[in-house]
């Protein structure tokens, strides 16, 4: 089951290289495989046992027996939620790429390979295999930005590559150090086994090893000051890649913090919790203040992502309390899913606006909702969800984080909550300047979203509203798995 989830997109990628260069066939093949992937993941999501605190659908085979490296796949609630997110965004990315005309076959082949790599990260339970998929993601991401991007696309692609490789170097050193620090007879990369051991008591320098992982995930999330690659990447990437980048690639950092730092090094995470609380405040407020100064609509959304990822860090800082807040941890995990959907919707609408106006400069826009009402509605709903409007998924995730983190770090929580006020300001400002006001004559002939664009918007609007109205649909999946992780320190 899990092997199919990982490799169905890569099968589609290989098939694309065999079907010739007909753009229409390439688009249809890519769409078929991402829809097939979504159907399979929906089956996985529905059949997942929500009552268990353990792992499900375990697949295990020896890979490199000499070093006890395994092909080990499994999912818990945290994995399932992010696998579901990746499957949704895979379909959206193909739909929003329907107008790609240059090297269509190669573009969709790389896009499907990217989805395989991200699936592998969320499903791999062998740390070495996890690292392989983590690195594999860089290959399609680099070429998708460098070849199909705009502006300083080669510069931005290289910046993404260099920042991530530096973080990966810290991760690789930590993985090897963790392996070699174990007793020779018990050495393993199995994260399920490692989570059951008292790593702090058994392994020397556990604190340094945990910091290596923290740096790697801080670059990916990103946490200030490791964030500078993100705005450039978003600005110059094609729309679909911005969707995947903000939707799931940043979430790899949050997933790693919960899975590895919280799951394997809870005591070390507790020691670092005050620093995480400070980092959360900086991320939220710095990102929000920088957003206010942006006139490029994609850079505005990019810095908004930096700000909102601070809420995830705030939720994890609750590990510093005498009693760990499961509410805050649940909120952090829900924020990974919610932010992925909301920001993807923002980038989809921004991309559709750019396709029609050929500008991202906000002062040149105005009155666009009269010409493209569906795109405008999508942008408004995503913006309101981003600022935490009740009945949207953004509100549920943020309120859980605030309620859970307040008892541990009340000042940090209050400052981060002020970030929501700032978000209301910059979101409403962006909506007013792009969609409302006098309609400029130059936009008189604009059209609304095409069929593929409408489907992309609808696929993202549904989870934003469903989770906002009935959050138990996802919290029931997350809670028991996160309770096991929190139990590592309790």
Image (cartoon, rainbow, N blue to C red):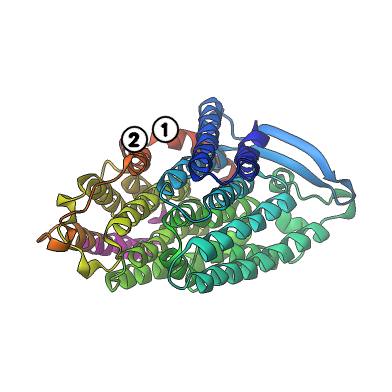
Q: Residue at x 69, y 45 (%)?
A: 125
Can the viewer see residue 220?
Answer: yes
- Compared with 247, 226 (above or below) is below
**Quadrant housing the N terminus:** top right
Residue 142, percent across and down?
Answer: 57, 63
Binning the other alpha carbons within 10 Å of mark 1 as few (below 14), some (14 to 19) or many (20 upward) gives few
Residue 463, image quadrant? top left
Q: Residue at x 21, y 69 (%)?
A: 363
Read off the residue under disc 2.
466
Query: In this image, 12 relative to 410: left or right?
Result: right
Residue closer to the observer: 111 or 205 = 111
Q: CB atoms at circles 1 and 2 under 8 Å apart?
A: yes
Q: Which secondary structure lies at badge 2?
A: helix
Q: Does the magenta run of residues contain 380?
A: no
Label 1 vs label 2: CA separation?
A: 8 Å
Can the viewer see residue 490?
Answer: no
Residue 233, percent across and down?
Answer: 47, 66
- Compared with 301, 114 (above or below) is above
Residue closer to the observer: 140 or 172 = 140
Residue 421, percent across and down?
Answer: 25, 61
Query: In this image, 128 relative to 334: left or right?
Result: right
Q: Which secondary structure lies at badge 1?
A: helix
Q: What span is in magenta?
A: 405-426
Numbered tag placed on residue 419 in the rendering:
none
Numbered tag placed on residue 473 in the rendering:
1
Q: Does the magenta run of residues contain 424?
A: yes
- Compared with 253, 226 (above or below) is below
Q: Please, what is the dominant secondary structure of the magenta stretch?
A: helix
């Amino acid at each position: 089951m899990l092997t199919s989830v990982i490799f169905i997109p890569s099968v589609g990628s290989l098939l694309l290289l065999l079907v010739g260069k007909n753009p229409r066939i390439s688009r249809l093949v890519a769409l078929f495989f991402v829809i097939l992937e979504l159907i399979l993941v929906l089956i996985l999501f529905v059949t997942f046992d929500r009552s268990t605190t353990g792992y499900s659908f375990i697949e295990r085979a020896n890979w490199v027996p000499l070093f006890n490296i395994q092909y080990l796949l499994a999912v818990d609630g945290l994995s399932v939620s992010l696998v579901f997110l990746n499957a949704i965004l895979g379909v959206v990315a193909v739909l929003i790429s329907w107008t790609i005309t240059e090297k269509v076959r190669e573009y969709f082949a790389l896009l499907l390979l990217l989805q395989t790599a991200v699936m592998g990260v969320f499903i791999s339970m062998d740390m070495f295999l996890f690292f392989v998929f983590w690195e594999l993601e860089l290959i399609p991401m680099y070429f998708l930005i460098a070849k199909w991007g705009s502006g300083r696309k080669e510069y931005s692609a290289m910046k993404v590559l260099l920042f991530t490789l530096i973080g990966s170097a810290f991760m690789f050193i930590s993985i090897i150090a963790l392996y070699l620090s174990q007793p020779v007879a018990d050495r393993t990369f199995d994260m399920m086994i490692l989570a059951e051991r008292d790593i702090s008591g058994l392994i020397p320098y556990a604190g340094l090893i945990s910091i290596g992982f923290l740096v790697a995930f801080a670059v990916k999330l990103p946490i200030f000051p490791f964030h500078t690659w993100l705005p450039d990447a978003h600005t110059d990437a094609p729309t679909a890649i911005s969707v995947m980048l903000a939707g799931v690639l940043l979430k790899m950092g949050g997933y790693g913090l919960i899975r590895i730092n919280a799951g394997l090094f809870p005591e070390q995470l507790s020691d670092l919790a005050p620093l995480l609380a400070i980092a959360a405040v900086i991320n939220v407020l710095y990102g929000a203040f920088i957003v206010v100064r942006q006139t490029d609509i994609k850079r505005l959304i990019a810095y908004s992502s930096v700000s909102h990822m601070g809420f995830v860090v705030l939720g994890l800082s609750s590990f510093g309390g005498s009693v760990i807040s499961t509410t805050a941890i649940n909120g952090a995990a829900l924020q990974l899913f919610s932010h992925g959907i909301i920001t993807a919707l923002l980038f989809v609408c921004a991309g559709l606006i750019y396709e029609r106006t050929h500008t991202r400069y906000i002062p040149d826009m105005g009155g666009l909702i009269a010409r493209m009402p569906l795109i405008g509605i999508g942008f408004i709903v995503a913006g309101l969800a981003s600022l935490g409007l009740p009945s949207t998924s953004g509100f549920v995730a943020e309120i859980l984080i605030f309620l859970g983190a307040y008892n541990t770090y009340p000042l940090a929580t209050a400052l981060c909550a002020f970030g929501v006020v700032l978000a209301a300001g910059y979101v409403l400002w962006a909506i007013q300047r792009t969609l409302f006001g006098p309609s400029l004559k130059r936009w008189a002939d604009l059209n609304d979203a095409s069929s593929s664009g409408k489907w992309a918007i609808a696929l993202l609007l549904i989870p934003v509203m469903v989770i906002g109205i009935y959050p138990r649909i996802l919290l029931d999946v997350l809670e028991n798995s996160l309770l096991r992780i929190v139990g590592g320190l309790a």
